[in-house]
Amino acid sequence: MSNDYQLTFKPDDLLQIIISSKDLKASIPFNLPVFAGSSKLREYAQGVPKLQSYLIDGSGVVEFPVLGRIKLGGLTRIEAIELIKQRLYPKYLKDPIVNILITNFKVTVIGDVKTPKVFQIENERVTIFDAIGMAGDLNISGLRNNVTVIREEFDEKSKYIVDLRSNNIMTSPVYYLQQNDVIYIQQNNAKAQDAAYTRSTGLFISLASVLISLITIITR
């Protein structure tokens, strides 16, 4: 199994870009804090403000202080860091250090699991098994050989079908999840038929009750 997975940045990613150097004063203009008058005032705990985040727009660009427009969409973290370093050195900083974090990384697990939910992920290196574990694992009726992962790629939705029991899952493109991936766990046929039967039975009982009421009224 290859362990060289690298996440790529996409439109609508919210990035926290932290710039530092030996010359602390020179790096200040590149680290804008959240405005104290905003609704995020609580983030100024103990006088330490949270840094501003930058949204990647539909064309893959962020508006960054001093440097202006920078195209980060489609780049890996390493590529984005190197690009920003090139824009900083040597004009603004002699020894720039750049760190980039995604602050809105999330995955969704729905279907036949114990706790279907949208999960905010702090560690961006998350596997399909990690996400299913956070959802409390599949119910006994969940299909492990027919798991669907929906992913947005190049402005289109792609669907992958994987078997969690197969060794091939380790080399699947969805083994490591990307931001906004959706995992759907399908019910087995017995559970689906039972649910359909239960709904039909409820409808039949309701109709029968209405008919009995009408007959009672007519025969009085």
Image (tube, rainbow, N blue to C red):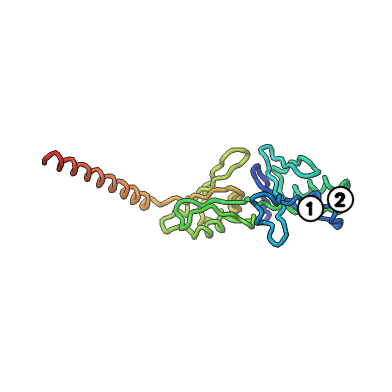
Query: Judging from the image, what secondary structure is the residue with disc 2 in?
Result: loop
In the image: residue 186, left or right of residue 96:
left
Say which quadrant the N terminus sits in.
bottom right
**Residue 3 coordinates in the image, percent (x, y):** 66, 56
Instruction: Kindly identify the residue that appears in the image at 56 percent across and 42 percent down.
Output: 158
**Residue 200 coordinates in the image, percent (x, y):** 30, 46
Q: Nearer the viewer, residue 57 or 188?
A: 57
Q: Quadrant of residue 64?
A: top right
Q: Which residue ends up furthest to the front in the rendered image?
A: 37
In the image: residue 19, left or right of residue 155:
right
In this figure, which residue is indicated by the disc labeled 2?
93
Whether residue 1 is visible, yes or no, is no
Categorize mark 1 by other alpha carbons within 10 Å: few (<14), some (14-19), many (20+): many
Q: Amino acid at mark 1?
A: Ile
Residue 172, compared with residue 217, is above or below; it is: below
Instruction: Kindly identify the residue that appears in the image at 68 percent across and 60 percent down.
Output: 45
**Residue 218 coordinates in the image, percent (x, y):** 14, 38
Instruction: Kindly identify the residue that appears in the image at 59 percent across and 56 percent down.
Output: 127
Q: Amino acid at mark 2?
A: Leu
Q: Earlier in the sequence, mark 2 or mark 1?
A: 1
Q: Quadrant of residue 123?
A: bottom right
**Residue 84 coordinates in the image, percent (x, y):** 79, 47
Whether residue 114 is visible, yes or no, is yes
Query: Judging from the image, what secondary structure is the residue with disc 1 in?
Result: strand
Q: What mark, if any, has residue 160 been given in the picture? A: none
Say which quadrant the C terminus sits in.
top left
Instruction: Kindly identify the residue that appears in the image at 72 percent across and 56 percent down.
Output: 49
Q: Which residue ends up furthest to the bottom in the rendered image?
A: 46
In this figure, which residue is indicated by the disc labeled 1?
19
Q: Nearer the viewer, residue 118 or 164?
A: 118
Marks 2,1: beta carbons within 8 A: yes
